[in-house]
Image (spheres, helix red, strand yellow):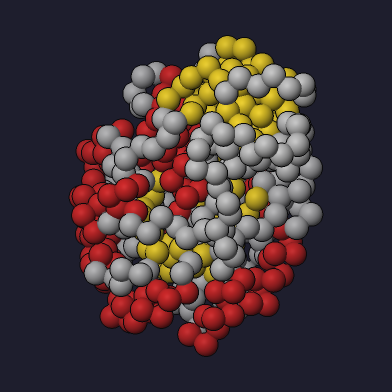
Amino acid sequence: MAPPPRLRSTENEAPGSGPPALILAGRAFVRGTLQAVEFAVDEDGRIQSLGRIRRGAPRHDVGDAVILPAATDLHVHLREPGPDTKTENLATGTVEAALGGVTLVGEMPNTEPPVTDVEVLEDKESIVNGRAAVDVLLYASPTRPGSLDGLARHAGGFKIYLSPTTGIADVPSLNEVPSLLDRLAPLRLPVSVHAEDPRQFRQGMDAKAPPDWNVERPPAAEAAALLPLVSAPRALRLHVAHVTEAASVTRLREAGLSFEATPHHLLLSERSGKSAAWKVNPPLRSERDRAALWEAFCRGEVPSLASDHAPHSGTAKEVDFARAPSGMPGVETMLPLFLARVRSGDLPLSTLVAAACDRPARWLGQPLGRLAPGHRANFLVVDFRARTTISARRLHAPCGWTAFEGWEGIFPREHYRDGQAIVLGGEYVGRPVGRVVRPEFAPVPSPGTRLVRPSG
Ligand code: NCD
Ligand code: ZN
């Protein structure tokens, strides 16, 4: 693992290197709150200093808009390599991310072929380089014990599936999970788990709509899958993907594990739509369960927000509900949906920034997610008055549909990566300079208690 970057500890201190390449001025989210500041970006695209800056450089005053750190999305499926890269691929998905204010994506390994050995991982790295609009962390799937050490030297993290899902047919049995976790613990990489216990699934349901899917893969499957995880070795950097139940939030906080919730489980329920567009794993839950998860999120009890962006073509989704694949797109709409909830007063901005920007970046060991000296100058300019109605026609996902049609969104006006604009006026203006990143420093070791507090 690479040594930790030398992040400066005194937040206002200028590193004293060359003159700034760019100066930003405006109300910015700094140390947990919005305040009028100026900050300088150095030649390397790092935030150099905060405070009043006199030295000359292009100065960008954002006026009535606000400057926020750009988001990290821990969980996307960009489908490459795979048989249907017309529906999504690493180039299109990372442009959607850029437009949605997401500056780093954690790309899942359930591609075709799946990322189970170093060769596939290296192929995937070569697809990212020269094509990605934002940075990409690649998860590997630790299914073959022999390949673990090699994978650990290349991968950004591991993903374990405890139940079958898109592209995953075979999963370890739950009694094999503790030994798998033991083997992963010394490798020091973040490990994300899809936590549904298939022994709790109801067979022979012939699901016709989302409420049936919620019966077929019930909340009890999530509760059961958490059992081997909450007793996992302490050394393990364990993260539970797409948590759907408030009871799981309590459980995971007590155990001190990292976890995420998705926009669809926080905003949609089993009654939100009838077609297979709303079929997703884990299923959309009852309105009561959704509301409880949302309350926990607003109280700052959910460490990270992640999209589980999992597009499928319209044609694939048009077959019978029972046979349709699970998953919905979401990387472009995640932050805009939640910025709109901040605007309407339902959600504190500090809670959103902590969950969408700061904690996921720290979980992946990246100097991102905060406007602080030494961090990469990856930030957004957001005009909270610019509310729009989300419509698939105006989104950039080639799959061409969204489960959030008609919802209100606030899209970032500008997005900067290492101090360079990649979105201006809501349009993508970047180049494919995104690169593969790996943890630069250890994920926060004891996330449960420390991660639940919004931090500035
Ligand atoms: C994901 C996909 O389509 O890749 N589908 C989903 O319903 N979330 C796989 C997964 O994360 O389970
Ligand atoms: Zn997923």
Instruction: Name the one closer to the observer, 412 or 270.
Output: 412
Give x and y (percent) for residue 34: 46, 22
Give x and y (percent) for residue 54: 69, 19
The residue at 48%/28% (across/down) is: 30
The residue at 36%/27% (across/down) is: 347
Report if residue 308 is visible in the image. Answer: no
Q: Is residue 426 left or right of residue 26?
A: right
Give x and y (percent) for residue 78: 61, 55
**Which quadrant would residue 139 be assigned to in this image?**
bottom right
From this view, report whether residue 324 is shown above or below residue 119. Answer: above
The residue at 34%/54% (across/down) is: 447
**Which quadrant would residue 77 be assigned to in this image?**
bottom right
Instruction: Name the one closer to the observer, 399 or 275.
Output: 399
Instruction: Name the one closer to the observer, 149 or 281.
Output: 149
In which quadrant is the N terminus drawn?
Answer: bottom right
From this view, report whether residue 272 is shown above or below residue 390. Answer: below
**Which quadrant would residue 90 be assigned to in this image?**
bottom right
From this view, report whether residue 95 is shown above or below residue 109. Answer: above
Q: Is residue 268 left or right of residue 357?
A: left
Give x and y (percent) for residue 450: 32, 48
In which quadrant is the C terminus drawn?
Answer: top left
Farthest residue in the bottom direction? 146
The residue at 27%/34% (across/down) is: 299
Instruction: Name the one closer to the observer, 285 or 78.
Output: 78
Report if residue 132 is visible in the image. Answer: yes
Q: Is residue 240 left or right of residue 15?
A: left
